[in-house]
């Protein structure tokens, strides 16, 4: 492997305009948290009203599942079927476990337990906006084969992958994973870029490469403290380095 000739400096003039990167950087988890607190306050009040009304109705007369459903309370089986019909991928066992742990509010009327429609709708809303940590990893892993689950969790713990705790579960915004998956497809990390350069027989040390990044001679973006270089920029850099070696640049 030959060393890159010194003397003439290679500068790549390219402006990175990437909506996915902008979307990730604009994520405000404090705003997410505040919005969630407001939702939970309203939800708690609404659920309490429905449950109290159902208890009063039940005290006056025997209520059927259909009557309770019209009042906004679903049996466990009806609740599960409702969620599945709306596309929520959850097993009945996992659903029952959440009810037992009281992460889903419910009320017992007679011998049966019922769930308020507001709580079910909230579950669907959360499912539309967030992934569980495991599911987020599975989606991201399709595009970044080099990351394992432990490393992924480490990034979540360090907040380089944004997350929010709702109830007892930690969740990750879907648009965050969408953006990170886009970056994994379209960009190289510093280590990946160096590996690509070396594969094409362009020798450059990491420190020298990072100095070029520091001086903005190589266009890149910074995400959660890490730098990423567009793949087409790395391809252009390789071409210019090889041309410089041949004296044609």
Image (cartoon, helix red, strand yellow):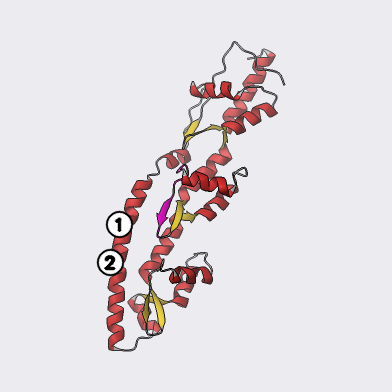
Above-or-below relation of 82 to 205: below
- Quick check: 55 above or below 46? below
The x and y percentages for residue 139 are 56, 51
* Magenta residues (range): 159-167
Q: Position of residue 187 (x, y in %)?
A: 56, 36
The local secondary structure at tag 1 comes to helix
* Residue, disc 2: 45
Residue in the picture at 31% in, 65% down: 44
Q: Is residue 196 left or right of residue 35?
A: right
Q: Which residue is mark 1?
A: 38
**Measured along the vertical axis of the image, is residue 138 above or below residue 47?**
above
Q: Choose the circle earlier in sequence order: 1 or 2.
A: 1
Which quadrant of the structure image shows residue 127? bottom left
Relative side of 126 to 192, left or right: left
Crowding at label 1, few (<14), some or many (≥20) Cα neighbours within 10 Å? few
Marks 1/2: CA distance? 11 Å
* Residue 160 is one of the magenta-drawn residues: yes
Q: Quadrant of the N terminus?
A: top right
Please state the total of marks drawn on the protein image.
2
Please state the horizontal and vertical placement of residue 247, each as a whole percent of the image. Answer: 67, 12
Q: Residue at x 57, y 21 (%)?
A: 208
């Amino acid at each position: 492997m030959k060393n890159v000739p010194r003397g003439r400096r290679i500068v790549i003039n390219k402006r990175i305009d990437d909506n996915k990167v902008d979307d990730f950087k604009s994520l405000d988890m404090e705003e997410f948290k505040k919005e969630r607190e407001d939702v939970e306050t309203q939800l708690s009040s609404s659920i309490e009203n429905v449950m109290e009304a159902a208890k009063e109705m039940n005290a006056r007369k025997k209520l059927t599942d259909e009557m309770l459903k019209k009042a906004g309370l679903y049996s466990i089986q009806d609740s599960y079927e409702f969620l599945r019909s709306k596309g929520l991928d959850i097993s009945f066992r996992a659903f029952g476990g959440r009810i037992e742990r009281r992460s889903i509010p419910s009320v017992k009327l007679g011998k049966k337990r019922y769930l308020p429609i507001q709580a079910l709708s909230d579950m669907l809303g959360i499912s539309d906006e967030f992934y569980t940590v495991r599911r987020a990893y599975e989606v991201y892993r399709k595009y970044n084969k080099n990351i394992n689950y432990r490393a992924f969790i480490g990034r979540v713990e360090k907040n380089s992958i944004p997350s929010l705790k709702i109830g007892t579960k930690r969740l990750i915004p879907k648009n965050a994973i969408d953006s990170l998956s886009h970056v994994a497809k379209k960009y190289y990390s510093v280590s990946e870029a160096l590996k690509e350069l070396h594969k094409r027989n362009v020798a450059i040390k990491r420190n020298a490469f990072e100095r070029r990044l520091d001086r903005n001679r190589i266009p890149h973006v910074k995400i959660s403290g890490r730098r990423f270089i567009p793949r087409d920029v790395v391809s252009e850099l390789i071409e210019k380095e090889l041309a410089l070696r041949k004296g044609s640049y």
